[in-house]
Image (cartoon, rainbow, N blue to C red):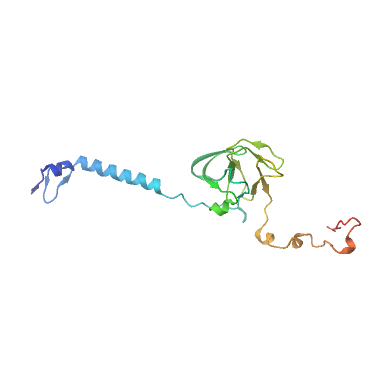
Amino acid sequence: MLKYTGTAWARWGYTGSIPGFPRVGRMMIRKLAAGLAAAGFAAVLLAPSPAVAAECTLGFCGTVKNNLPSYYTVKVARFGVGNETCWTYNAGSFTCQTYWLPSGKSSSDIGVKDADGFMLEQPFRHGILGQVLPAYTWVKIPSIATVWCNLLNGATTPTCYQCPPIRRERAQQPVAALLPQRADLSEARLGQRGHVGVEVE
């Protein structure tokens, strides 16, 4: 039978006597639990953000392209993930994970394969003929949308507008290949003022 009564053992919470081994006292259990809790909290803080899930639709992915000068701040978001809240003017609020989108980059460049929304930290126009939204206003976009943010015609208010989706294989074709197949661009079809006559069924 071993007896542990020294001050060193008492400091760590060992009390009583057990054949061969000391009994762990309540103080030691509390210290151990506190240490594990602190380690778990630190692991949560240091853990990387979860991978961005791809939710593209029919091969199209929501994309935002920032063509604004660097003094404009653009952010994109994935909805349904993360621990932030994005309040959109056109679709309500969503749990979200937000990402800063640098000037000259697209959302896919920063690892967001399918962006669900965007916002600017300055007032901006949504759509070429759309309304001007206040700064920090989120806009929800569909998965098939590609949104460009530009300064149009020397304007000081940025405009973010949606472009129709074009499949990659079509985008790589020459422009002539995208015209109607029966288009006749011969010189015989040129009008007196240089207009091109195109026959389309």
Q: Quadrant of the C terminus?
A: bottom right
171 sits left or right of 34 in the view = right
Q: Residue shown at 90%/63% (left/top)? A: 188
Residue 116, image x, y percentages:
58, 46
> Which residue is farthest top?
134
The one nearer the camera, 72 or 113, is 72
Q: Position of residue 114 (x, y in %)?
A: 57, 51
**Residue situated in front as seen by the camera: 103 or 110:** 103
The quarter of the displayed image where residue 197 is located: bottom right
Please identify the quarter of the rendering in which residue 171 is found: bottom right
Q: Residue furthest left?
A: 1
Q: How many marks?
A: 0
34 with respect to 120 (left or right): left
Is residue 185 toward the left or the right of residue 69 in the image? right
Report x, y in % for residue 102.
56, 48
Residue located at (88% from left, 60% from top): 190
Q: Residue at x 21, y 40 (%)?
A: 27
Q: Is residue 15 visible?
A: no
124 in relation to 51, above or below: above
Quadrant hosting residue 26: top left
Q: Nearer the viewer, residue 27 or 189?
A: 189
Residue 86 in view of the camera:
yes
Q: Is residue 13 left or right of residue 161?
A: left
Picture coordinates of residue 176 (x, y %)? 76, 62
Furthest residue in direction right, as rendered? 192
